[in-house]
């Protein structure tokens, strides 16, 4: 058991690690709280059973996932030996899952936090509202009292981070040593939170795996998206939005996304209050001054989405950040830059740059301008068999960072070795050290001039200014 300021939690102990699953950090966002900012969980009497994972956020049907609108819970893994006295707590790693802002869970098996806990880190995985319940601006549909609801998922994460500040000491963690991290949408949300003033003092360093801070839209765009969703929703109107089963909202969300011309229409909103301007502008202005950032991408991210052998050039449905015409203008220069590449590889390379590489570099550059320090990586390791043979595809980094490598590829032994190295490097960074591990070369800081980058591979190496000419193609575009 653990006694927290909110009340007593009953978890379980497994192999020297205390595990607390389904810990509430907010009141259920249901009924009158639907589309509202999250409300801090009230204190409870007695014990709260924290031995089972809570339901995932509502998302398109997957019969293997237990889903509910009541989803604002987190999970904690902590070594059994707690801090002896104040100020000697363990570092904390708060993890935001990915899933394109519409899917994913905090309790996927790969996010099982025992390895981090055994390394002396309190590992916390958090949930947040997805899709229209967390990212749709409802003011045009429900009135002024719902202004800003398109950022409720960000508010969920801020409330979870406030819970960490108030409660993590009870698990042996140090609230002054919090690393915020995530992958894919979780990394994008991490990068966006770097530019949210209200979140400034809630974390102290960041890990961004395949992210970027471009998945934001203007208030005008948010209003247009709301109107488009309202047209799909139809005659049920405001009363239906407030009262209909959440499954009906998700079904309408699926129809809406399929009909909308822009990829990823559900985005964080630059609305002037919670998010006053573009995150990279706030970051460059010093919102993360003095903080440390570990950031990177995978060489062939987009192979996961368009397939390893895409037979056509990109369409608007493949793009996350720029209009098709702008992308085509840049892509037209790729063949001259990489004459040795096949058309398939060129398509994947350019899409990877548009969605992940360039946005991540922009975050790192802004962070450095704002007075922070950074370390950059690029994952080049690729499976030697299977569908993604020879591609360092999106999400491959997860098995490395969490030390849960793929065992069903021909070069599984090499990946297991790299996974241990990457996991140890992440642990070192979370502890406040430079990222590094036995087997990896010395990892220099990323500076705007040299841009030294760790290339993670069977034989990892440091490379200066990787893809420099390619990045120049995107100047003024992204």
Image (cartoon, helix red, strand yellow):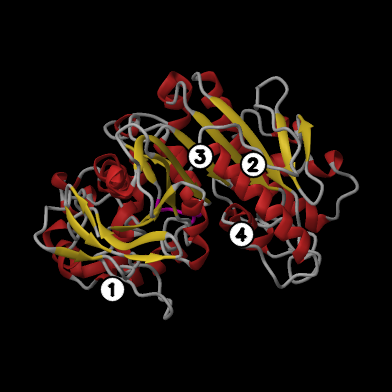
Q: Could you tell me if the residues under marks 1 and 4 are in contact, i.e. CB atoms within 8 Å?
A: no
Q: Residues within 10 Å of mark 2 (few under 14, many from 20)?
A: many
Q: Could you tell me if the residues under marks 3 and 1 are in contact, i.e. CB atoms within 8 Å?
A: no
Chain-order first, disc 3 or disc 1: 1
Q: In this view, does 68 lie to the left or right of 206?
A: left
Q: What stretch is highlighted in magenta?
A: 261-266
Locate residue 66, reporting x and y percent.
35, 75
Q: How crowded is mark 4: few (under 14 residues within 10 Å), some or many (20 or more)?
A: many
Determine the CA span between mark 4 and mark 2: 20 Å
Nearest the camera: 117 or 29? 117
State the SS at label 1. Answer: helix
The residue sitting at 73% across, 49% down in the picture is: 349
Foreground mark, 4 or 2, reads 4
Q: Residues within 10 Å of mark 1 (few under 14, many from 20)?
A: few
Residue 248: give its label. 1
Q: Could you tell me if the residues under marks 4 and 2 are in contact, i.e. CB atoms within 8 Å?
A: no
Q: Could you tell me if the residues under marks 2 and 1 are in contact, i.e. CB atoms within 8 Å?
A: no
The residue sitting at 45% across, 26% down in the picture is: 283
Residue assigned mark 3: 430
Q: Is the magenta stretch mostly helix, strand or loop?
A: loop
Residue assigned mark 2: 357
Foreground mark, 3 or 2, reads 3
Answer yes or no: is residue 223 visible: no
Residue assigned mark 4: 399
Foreground mark, 4 or 3, reads 3
Determine the CA span between mark 2 and mark 1: 36 Å
């Amino acid at each position: 058991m653990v006694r927290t300021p909110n009340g007593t939690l009953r978890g379980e102990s497994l192999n020297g690690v205390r595990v607390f699953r389904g810990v509430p950090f907010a009141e259920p966002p249901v009924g009158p709280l639907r589309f509202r900012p999250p409300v801090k969980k009230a204190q409870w009497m007695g014990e709260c059973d924290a031995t089972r994972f809570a339901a995932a956020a509502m998302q398109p049907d997957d019969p293997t996932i237990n889903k509910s609108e009541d989803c604002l819970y987190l999970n904690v893994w902590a070594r059994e030996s707690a801090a002896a006295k104040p100020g000697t707590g363990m570092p904390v790693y708060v993890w935001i899952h990915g899933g394109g802002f519409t899917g994913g869970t905090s309790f996927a098996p790969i996010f099982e936090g025992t390895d981090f806990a055994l390394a002396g880190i309190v590992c916390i995985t958090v949930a947040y509202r997805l899709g229209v319940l967390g990212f749709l601006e409802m003011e045009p549909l429900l009135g002024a009292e719902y202004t800003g609801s398109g950022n409720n998922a960000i508010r969920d994460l801020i409330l979870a981070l406030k819970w960490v500040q108030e409660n993590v000491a009870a698990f042996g963690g140090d609230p002054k040593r919090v690393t915020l991290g995530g992958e894919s949408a979780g990394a994008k949300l991490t990068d966006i939170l770097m530019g949210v003033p209200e979140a400034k003092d809630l974390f102290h360093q960041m890990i961004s795996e395949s992210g970027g801070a471009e998945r934001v839209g203007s208030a005008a765009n948010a209003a247009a998206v709301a109107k488009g969703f309202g047209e799909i929703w139809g005659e049920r109107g405001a009363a239906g939005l407030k009262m209909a089963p959440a499954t009906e909202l998700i079904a309408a969300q699926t129809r809406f996304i399929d009909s909308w011309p822009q990829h990823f229409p559900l985005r964080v909103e630059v609305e002037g209050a919670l998010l006053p301007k573009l995150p990279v502008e706030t970051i460059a202005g010093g919102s993360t001054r003095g903080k440390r950032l570990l950031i990177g991408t995978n060489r062939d991210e987009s192979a996961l989405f368009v397939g390893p052998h895409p037979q056509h050039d990109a369409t608007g449905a493949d793009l996350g950040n720029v209009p098709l015409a702008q992308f085509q203008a840049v892509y037209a220069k790729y063949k001259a830059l990489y004459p040795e590449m096949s058309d398939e590889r060129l398509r994947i390379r350019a899409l990877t740059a548009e969605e992940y590489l360039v946005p991540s570099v922009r975050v790192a550059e802004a962070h450095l301008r704002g007075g922070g320090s950074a370390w950059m990586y690029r994952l080049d390791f690729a499976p030697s068999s299977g569908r993604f043979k020879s591609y360092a595809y999106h999400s491959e980094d997860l098995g490395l960072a969490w030390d849960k490598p793929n065992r069903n590829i021909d070069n599984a032994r090499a990946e297991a070795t790299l996974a241990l190295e990457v996991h140890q490097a992440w642990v070192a960074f979370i502890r406040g050290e430079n990222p590094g591990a036995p087997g990896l070369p010395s990892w220099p800081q990323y500076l705007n001039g040299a841009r030294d980058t760790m290339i993670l591979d069977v034989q990892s190496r440091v490379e200066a200014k990787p893809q420099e000419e390619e990045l120049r193609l995107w100047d003024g575009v992204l």
